[in-house]
Amino acid sequence: MTAPQRDILLVDDHSLILTGISGIVERIPEINRVFSATSFAGAVKWIDLRRFDIYLLDIELPDGNGFDLIKRIRAKDPDARIIINTMHEEVWTINRLVECRVDSIILKSSDTAVVEHAVRAVINGCSYCCPRFEHIHRRLRRDKNTELPGDTPTKRELEVLKAIVKGLNTSEIATQLGISINTVETHRKQLFLKFGVRNVVELTMKAISRGWATVE
């Protein structure tokens, strides 16, 4: 009896990574067609257009984030099978991924073989987390006060954060800190993603509540 064929959507803004993952999943007999997107907007177009058997998503995208994609996918298909492939190993990322209850989590620092393990596990109706993720998650369960690099704002992120709280716009922040507008936007996007906020108001409230900034 022929095994059911499945379609998969891959989402990653790095074309080389996307090509590498495509090459891996295309060798899996149960995978029928491989679709891909390199941006949040591109992923949304595919998600709104049709249903996929498996979604393999990166968390950080140039115009959005994977957490919002997860919500969008779940809203359309509560039983969707979702794999997360991310480079982020910070406490806040680990905790949010666990809360999202995705089917598989793999870290880009792991061997590429884990991609195939993850896809095969999901195809068989199982969950899978790469060894590196399991190691970090066990540490967090043992000690809830454990902090990993990246759990708090970096020095530059903190400078951008304080400027945002003061009400400065992107151009003004760039001038004040002597950095490019693109760099400011990158830090802004990272702050939104890191602290799970959707707008400047939420970011400001969180910054004040945690003592990272004050309103003058």
Image (cartoon, rainbow, N blue to C red):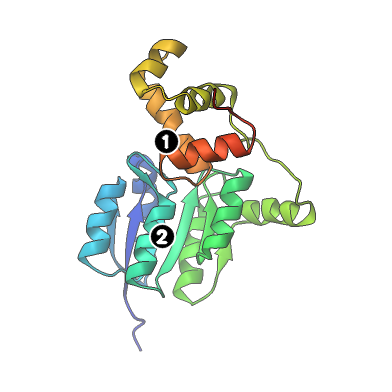
Residue located beneath label 2 in the image: 70
Residue 108 in the image, given as x and y percentages of width and height: 52, 46
Residue 72 in the image, given as x and y percentages of width and height: 35, 61
- Label 2: which secondary element: helix
At 42% across and 14% down in the image, what residue appears?
Answer: 179
Residue 194 in the image, given as x and y percentages of width and height: 52, 41
The amino acid sitting under disc 2 is Ile
State if disc 1 and disc 2 touch (CB < 8 Å).
no
Residue 178 visible somewhere in the drawing: no
- Label 1: which secondary element: helix
Which label is found at residue 189? Answer: 1
Image position of 154 with respect to 19: above or below? above
At 58% across and 60% down in the image, what residue appears?
Answer: 98
At 35% across and 52% down in the image, what residue appears?
Answer: 11
Label 2: how many Cα within 10 Å (few below 14, some 14–19, many 20+): many
Q: Earlier in the sequence, mark 2 or mark 1?
A: 2
